[in-house]
Amino acid sequence: MRLGRRAGLTLLAAAVAAGPLSPVSAATSWWTRAPGPQRALQAIASNSDATTLVITAGRAYWLDTRSGKLLGGGSPRGAQFVAAAGSQGLALNSDGALYRLRLPGLAHLLQRLPGEPRGLAISSGSQPVALAATTAGLYLGGLRSGLRRVAGSVPGNPVTAVAPPVSPGQPFALATRLGIELVSVSGRIRSSRGAPHLGDRPVLAEMGDGILLAGDQAGMIYAHYRTGWNPVFQLLPYGGVAGVPRLTAILGVGPDAAYVATSGFGTLLTPDAGFTWYRAAPATPDGRVVALAALGPLYATHPSGLVAAAAPSGLFLHRLQTLPGPPVYAGASQTAEVVGTAAVTVGASVAVILAMWWWERRRRGRQLSV
């Protein structure tokens, strides 16, 4: 479906708890528990490799998702946000201390940022740039030289969520109390026109083709296409008087596909930037997923890698794969299919005409004999 058509979508609602939504609901079987001890993770960072930064028991560690082993000594307690780029990464603590972690060594204090931490992200590409958000403003810079305050960042408009760019050249996306802002890797800030006000604890993500997805705590998800912002999905109540589950994360996993994590339905999947939705959740006992991450080249021309879902009951992984779809015919096979269909149609038509002619001739013969 083209973006122009998507822009006219009305609200979609799906009773995802009522049972299978489609054959893709079998995606539950895609998920497997990560090897190793089942740790409770508070956060996990996307990375270009299967080894990434996580927060467990209040400290940031490197985690090899293939073996389940924690690598390095970790950062001091109080870690609140982590971001990774290859073998290096950052951890931002609740007191504003920003630590640099490099495989497989220890954490080193890079600097202290003023204000209360609100988010941390690292751009993609060969020369990654980090963006940290606090109540004092935005801070941007390289992973080794430290971060500098971005001119024009307003402390009176606090950031509530940060999403990293998934392709070189894309800006960081920030949810704020006044809307959504885009920040280039050079520090230029611009507002996203018509963006929704998401309130406290929103979720935000970019996808490979530049589409943005954002959600609020009422369970409403919005998408930004080339034509602007549109509401595309409303999460329904979990059942009884439990209310609408909280949205905990959104993760782009390709040009226009994304996962949404919730506190009751596990994870939901949209393969087409919000047009359709499926329940594709790991088998957690309570349906809670607290964080999502992409591990590997999920934003490449031919995406591959792992999707990671952190739950109170442990870490779940599944390898990115193509959704079931109708067969596609091409080349000679397509021509043969068309010719064969035409031949069957013509043959059936001729048979019907002959049968009608025979029946009419027989009926007339009976009338003459009388």
Image (cartoon, grey):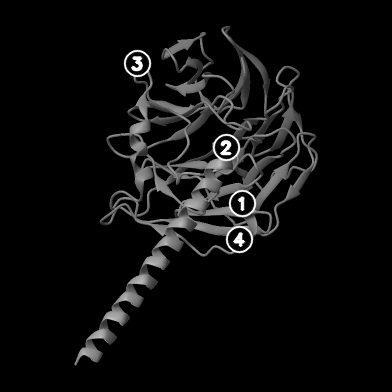
Residue at the spot x=62%, y=23% of the render? 97
Q: If you read the primary sequence from the N terminus, does the residue marked by circle 4 or circle 3 appear first?
A: 4
Mark 4 vs mark 3, CA separation in Å = 47 Å
Mark 2 vs mark 3, CA separation in Å = 30 Å
Residue receiving disc 3: 37
Q: In the rendering, at what x and y percent does residue 345 appear?
A: 44, 61
Instruction: Mark 1: give few (<14), some (14-19) or many (20+) Cα within 10 Å.
Output: some
Contact flag, marks 1 and 3 (Cβ < 8 Å): no
Q: If you read the primary sequence from the N terminus, does the residue marked by circle 2 or circle 4 appear first?
A: 4
Query: For this rendering, which residue is in front, 15 or 158?
Result: 15
Residue receiving disc 4: 5
Q: Amino acid at mark 2?
A: Gly
Residue receiving disc 1: 177
Q: Amino acid at mark 4?
A: Arg
Q: If you read the primary sequence from the N terminus, does the residue marked by circle 2 or circle 1 appear first?
A: 1
Q: Is residue 268 above or below residue 362?
A: above
Mark 1 vs mark 4, CA separation in Å = 30 Å
Look at discs 1 and 4 and give the one toward the viewer: 4
Q: If you read the primary sequence from the N terminus, does the residue marked by circle 1 or circle 3 appear first?
A: 3
Q: In the rendering, at what x and y percent does residue 32 appear?
A: 35, 26
Q: Quadrant of residue 49?
A: top right
Residue receiving disc 2: 254
Q: Quadrant of residue 13?
A: bottom left
Q: Is residue 217 left or right of residue 100?
A: left
Query: For this rendering, which residue is in front, 261 or 20?
Result: 20
Instruction: Mark 2: give few (<14), some (14-19) or many (20+) Cα within 10 Å.
Output: many
Q: Quadrant of residue 133?
A: top right
* Residue farthest to the front, as pictured: 369
Look at discs 2 and 1 and give the one toward the viewer: 2
Mark 2 vs mark 1, CA separation in Å = 28 Å
Mark 2 vs mark 4, CA separation in Å = 20 Å
Q: Is residue 351 above or below residue 175?
A: below
